[in-house]
Amino acid sequence: MNCYRSECTGVGRWRIVLLLFAPMDYKDAPPARGETSLIVCDAHKEVTTVDDILTDESWAKIERSFAAIGRVMPVRERTRLEFVPC
Ligand SMILES: [Zn+2]
């Protein structure tokens, strides 16, 4: 599978997972994991940031899914990326 960056022909080796953290009041809570279908190559793994992945649209979707299960809303600014080998 190729890297998700449209201009890239690199081999996708890493799946991107969003780590969604609750507010600081819940600092001991482990982050929720938001799986994505995005795969990046080694080079793009180094330069991909949360802002590349987390659009307003995807954040709204996350908020809806958290609301649906009554979970404490994550804080967008605390979101981190995790790269899982695939
Ligand atoms: Zn790439």
Image (cartoon, helix red, strand yellow):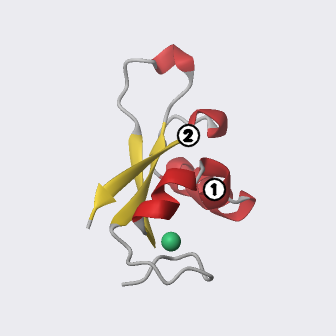
Q: Residue at x 49, y 84 (%)?
A: 9
Q: Residue at x 40, y 36 (%)?
A: 31
Read off the residue under disc 2: 79
Q: Residue at x 60, y 56 (%)?
A: 64
Q: Amino acid at mark 1?
A: Leu
Q: For this rendering, which residue is in front, 27 or 67?
A: 27
Residue 5 placed where, x, y %?
58, 75
Read off the residue under disc 1: 54
Residue 75 placed where, x, y %?
61, 34
Q: For this rendering, which residue is in front, 49 or 46?
A: 46
> Can residue 14 be seen in this snapshot?
yes
- In the rendered image of this protein, does residue 83 appear above or below residue 4? above
Q: Residue at x 49, y 34 (%)?
A: 21
Residue 77 placed where, x, y %?
66, 35
SS type, badge 2: loop
Q: Amino acid at mark 2?
A: Thr
Residue 17 placed where, x, y %?
41, 55
Q: Residue furthest right?
A: 56
Q: Residues within 10 Å of mark 2 (few under 14, many from 20)?
A: some
